[in-house]
Amino acid sequence: MGKITNIWPHDLLTFANNDDLILEKNPLPEWAKDSLSKAKIVVVRRGIIKNNLIPVGLRGYERNQRLAGFLKKSSIEKQYHPDYFIKHESWRDLPIERQKLIAFQALIKIAPLLADYQWGISGSLAYEMATGIKMVKESPEHVSDLDLIMLDLPEFSVDEAKNFLAKLNQFGTHADVQVVHGENCFSLEEYSLGRAQEILIKTATGPILSDNPWQAIKEE
């Protein structure tokens, strides 16, 4: 493992031993035991790193299967930033039948549209590309979202944001775009609706409201 430097929300972290993971529920539910038996991997939650304990979340296959906890920084074996999967075109490592899913096809088609931006993917697509475990869903009722992480996106007007999102939402699934700077982020979709005078900003110390989200995410 190379030296671990910055750790950001949405990063995926792998580790070797269950004992390195401190979860907030004990005994563990069966889905959590099953998840850990398949892959020792967690996603970084937004929060303060204290005593080298990173706030993380364990996920299962279903949306409601989420468990918060902490991982010892010294236990990290591998770190995946959201942009890792784009730079390495990690979908190519999946079986062809998985690459053909609507969500992965949408990601493949979106990638050239975002070539001039700093961005990455999180959520179920990132999890599946990191582990090979089938997490992305496709059924008549539900297709997995694209959880896009846009780093330091240039400031858009409301109309520009609408047009940007329209380009990303033409491939059969919903593109959920988070505009990110460091620990802070906001939803581009919420901003694009132009309905609220104040937009929700997620920060390491909790949510805040701002009438200028582009400026607010850059404030420490």
Image (cartoon, rainbow, N blue to C red):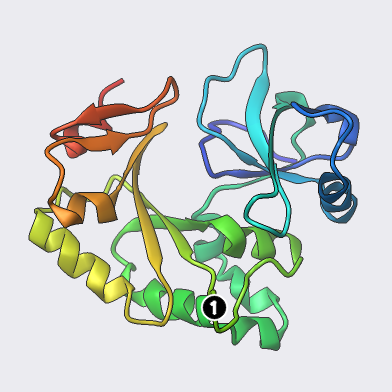
The structure residue drawn at horizontal position 61% and vertical position 82%, both measured from the top left corner, is: 99
Kind of residue at badge 1: Glu
- On screen, 121 above or below 197? below
Residue in view at x 64 percent, y 26 percent: 54
Task: Quadrant for residue 2, please give it.
Answer: top right
Q: Secondary structure at mark 1?
A: loop
Q: Nearer the viewer, residue 135 or 77?
A: 135
Quick one: label 1, few (<14), some, or many (20+) residues within 10 Å? Answer: few
Query: Hey, which residue is sitting farthest top in the picture?
Result: 51
Quarter of the image with the C terminus in it: top left
Q: Which residue is mark 1?
A: 141
Query: Is 131 on the left-hand or right-hand side of 171?
Result: right
Q: Position of residue 149 (x, y in %)?
A: 41, 52
- Locate residue 16: give its quadrant: top right
Q: Position of residue 71 (x, y in %)?
A: 73, 28
User: Which residue lies most toward the front here?
Assistant: 141
Tally of numbered tags? 1
